[in-house]
Amino acid sequence: MPSTISATVYHNYIDGRWAPSASGSTFENRNPANTDDLIGVFQQSTRRDVEAALAAAASAYERWRLVPAPRRAELLYGVAQMLVSRKEEFARDMTREMGKVLNETRGDVQEAIDMTFYMAGEGRRMFGQTVPSELRNKFAMSVRQPLGVCSVITPWNFPMAIPSWKIIPALVCGNTVVFKPASTTPLSAVNFVKVLEEAGIPKGVVNMVTGDGEEVGTPLTTDDVVRVVSFTGSTHVGRIVNQAAAPGFKKVHLEMGGKNVIMIMEDANLELAVDGCLWGGFGTTGQRCTAASRVVVHEKVYKPFLEQFVARAKSLVIGDGLRDETQMGPSNSEGQLNTVIKYVKIGRDEGARLVAGGNRLTAGTHAKGYFHEPTIFADVNTRMRIAREEIFGPVVSVMPCRSLDEAIDIGNDVEYGLSASIYTQDINRAFTAMRDLYTGIFYVNAPTIGAEVHLPFGGTKHTGNGHREAGGAALDVFSEWKSIYVDFSGKLQRAQIDVESL
Ligand code: NAD
């Protein structure tokens, strides 16, 4: 291992101060395209650090909740402007630690910018309702109230976008936050939190603690102080989080795994569909919760589709995401690469036909990174594990179908329900599929990825637990309703009892 002596040491951010963990321990963050490149050393935090962060957040909440929402929003507009000015720098840091290509990390920072501008606008909206009372001289309305301290636990695949989807709406609603980023992308978390600090978010309102999922995550999901847990990650850990938070009746918002499908009908524009499958399947090296890991193709166009898809996948340039020519970067970590390798073996053993890729890349510029070929299995059926389980890597399963009905059945035949899409020229089929796919997101003539921040984002079944982030729906996670009645009649009026004759 190369020396770590000269590496930058990054700290936790608690109560407005950057400080080391009480543990005295740290962990390294390395570039997945070249593991000789040490990005930095980060705090291996413990329960004590989390408790200090939660105490700071609880104390800051009493002041922050009383700051008028339009004033909170002004600070957030400043955050958005600072993100704009540092977009390129942050994108480069992100590619170095996460691996995806520079255009995609620019998109990741842009998503944080979009979300911050959008949510800052909520500071002057955040509408409630006013309704007529059933009694005379009585006023009835509802208002959104903050909940208190929110735990924000995030994955590594969107290192700035996903934290922003949670932290920014939490703040505009008047909550305070303790943020635990994924351990392979802590630099992007530090970059984001520094912007919040520099934009003037008061001390204690946002706190960040890095470290191991279980050690840091457990108090964030169980401590009495926490009122909301907003988690994005695997379904496996989401279940642990859900169970940990249940005894305290915390509000738990979970965004979890996916096994998304693109359906291609015989009347589809095939070239467009191939473009969509390449972007959906191999964009972000297949490491998107919305990645199109299944493609269901009508038997009449199955062969020509497959030929074009395989040829295009084989021509993708794999490498360091910071290089201009690179079209697909490495897996984010050794563990993630091993999962890909494991599932390629499972696919072969299950009898799926390997038609592209299938191997780790280890020669030349790939020698020091977690690179894998874009991989396509054909003739996959719904019983195979590669068609059912989330792989989170550059592996796509192609399955034939005879009709739209069959495509929809295959599409729905997984435990997840995040995103689906159809390629067809037939509006009747498009609307049928739009209605019948049991997912939170649906696309027509576009791949399964491409969400915009002003519409709700999330999934059904084992992908989510009924909440949505982004759009106005995010406010429902980070606020709760209070109904208020103001009686200005000067006498006791009993609802449902004092019914006045007209
Ligand atoms: P992960 O579940 O391994 O980790 C997610 C976060 O949870 C990390 O910060 C991790 O440290 C933390 N964690 C681990 N154990 C914990 C525990 N016991 N208590 C509390 N926190 C704990 O997921 P990952 O590998 O970082 O990300 C990949 C997964 O995220 C994929 O399944 C992907 O589909 C999913 N994802 C979902 C969405 C969505 O919106 N639905 C978006 C992006 C990623």
Image (cartoon, helix red, strand yellow):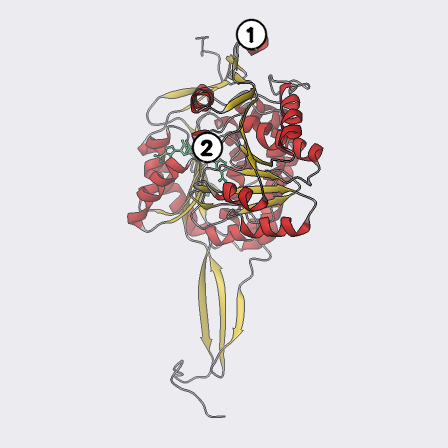
Amino acid type, label 1: Ala
In which quadrant is the N terminus drawn?
top left
Using the rendered view, name the quadrant where residue 28 is placed: top left
Residue 460 has which mark? none
As measured in the structure, the alpha-carbon distance from the residue carrying label 2 to the one carrying label 1 is: 28 Å
Residue at disc 1, CB closer than 8 Å to ligand 1: no
The residue under label 2 is: 390
2 or 1: tag closer to the N-terminus: 1
Secondary-structure class at tag 1: loop
Q: Is residue 292 visible?
A: no
The residue under label 1 is: 363
The residue drawn where x is 52% and y is 41% is 411
Determine whether, in the image, residue 130 is placed left or right of residue 239: right
Q: How many numbered marks have been drawn onto this rendered protein structure?
A: 2
Q: Position of residue 115 (x, y in %)?
A: 59, 43
Q: Is residue 456 visible?
A: yes
Furthest-left residue in this view: 247
Residue at disc 2, CB closer than 8 Å to ligand 1: yes
Q: Position of residue 25 (x, y in %)?
A: 35, 21
Q: Which quadrant contains ligand 1?
A: top left
Q: Position of residue 136 (x, y in %)?
A: 49, 84
Nearer to me, 491 or 417: 417
User: Could you tell me if the residues under marks 2 and 1 are in contact, i.e. CB atoms within 8 Å?
Assistant: no
Secondary-structure class at tag 2: loop
Q: Is residue 348 above or below residue 455?
A: above
Determine whether, in the image, residue 499 is placed left or right of residue 110: left
- Mark 2, Cα crowd under 10 Å, few <14 / some 14-19 / many 20+, is many
The residue drawn where x is 58% and y is 7% is 364
Amino acid type, label 2: Glu
